[in-house]
Image (cartoon, grey):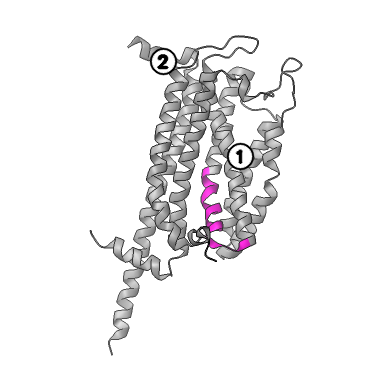
Amino acid sequence: MTLPWSRFAAPATFYPLAGRLIPIFWVLAAALILTAFYWGFFETPDQLGGSNAQKGYYRIIFIHVGSAWMSMWLYGMLVLWAAVGLVFKTRLSFMMANAIAPTGAIFTFLALWTGAIWGRPSWGTYWDWDPRLTSELILFFLYVGYIALHSAIDDSRRADRAASLLAIVGLVMVPVIFWSINCPDPNQCAALHQRSGLGKVDGNILFAMLTMTLGFWMYSFATTLMRLRGIILTREAETSWVQDLIRSEGRPA
Amino acid sequence: MKPLMEFLAQGGFAGYVWSAYGMTLALLVIETVSLRRQRRAILARLSRLLRLRGTEDHRGDQP
C-alpha cells in the first residue's frame, strides 16, 4: 500500500511527526484557554436574570461544559482507534487508544467535579442520581476499567484486544449521556439538565464556552501525543530505530 | 486592590468557582508534569538498557 496515511501508521514515521506537533498544540491550548478564561470572567454579564436566575457560580459553565464534551469526544476517539486496531491490526491504533484514555478519564472526572460544585449552590446538592450524572459516572468507570484491564494483562497484544472490546461495548454510554434529559421543557419541570440549544446561550458566554472547549481539545492532542511517544518508545524498544534514537539522544549534544 | 478583591470574591461564590477552576488547573498541570517525568524515565531506562547490552556484547567479543 502506498497511500500516505498508511505510511504515517508506522510508529517509526509517526514518532518524529508527533514530536513536531506537540509544541504547536501546547501553544494553541494555552492561547485558547487563556482567551476563554479572560472572556468568561471579564466579558460576560455578572448575573443572569430571567426565569432561570444564575449568579456568580455560573462561570463554572466554561470548564464544566468543555470537560463534559471532551469526556464524550475522547471516548469516541478511543473507541474509533480501538476498532481500527481490531479491524486492520495496526499497532499504532491501539497505542493511540491507550494514549487517549488517561486524558479522557481526567476530563470525565473534571466534568463530575465541576458539576458537583455547580450543583451545590444551584440545586442544593452536590450529587443526585440524575440520568446524566449517573451515565457520566459510568463513563468515568469505563475509562478506569479500560486502563485497569489493559494494565492487568501482561501480553500487550492480548491486552489491546481485550481492552478494545470493553471500550467498544462501553460506547453505548455516550449517546445515553447525550440524550439523558428527563425534562424536555424547563417550564414544565425542574430537572438538573434541561434541553437547551447553543442558540439559546448568550453570545459572550457561548464564545467563552466554545473557546475553552477548543483549548481543552488542543490540550488533549498535546498530552495524548506526548503519552503516545512514550508508549511507542516502550513498545518498540527492541527495534533498531528506537535504539538508534536512544543512542543519539543519550549523547550530550 | 478593591477590584481584585471583588474579582476573587466572585459575588460570594469564591469557594465554588475557585475550587472548580483550581481542580481543573491542578489536574492539567499534574498530567503535564507527570508526562514529562515519564518521558525522562523511559529515555533513561532505555539508554541504561542499551549501555548494559553494549558492555555485554563487548565482553562476548573477547576470547
Is A192 colored magenta in this rendering?
no
Judge whether A177 appears above or below A47 on screen: below
Q: Quadrant of residue A85?
A: bottom right
Q: Position of residue A42 (x, y in %)?
A: 43, 17
Q: Which disc, if any, is residue A171?
A: none
**Above/below status of A77 relative to A176:** below
Which residue is at the front of the view, A16 or A57? A16
For the residues labelled 1 and 2, the Cα–Cα distance comes to 32 Å
Please tell me whether mark 1 sits on a helix, a strand or a loop: helix
Element carrying mark 2? helix
Q: Chain of mark 2?
A: B
Main SS category, magenta section: helix
Q: What residue is disc 1 on?
A: A72
**Location of residue B63 in the rendering, given as x and y in whole percent from the top left corner:** 28, 90
Which residue in the structure is indicated by mark 2?
B7
**For the point 71% across and 44% down, which residue is it?**
A172
Between circles 1 and 2, the one closer to the viewer is: 1
Q: Which residues are magenta?
A: A88-103
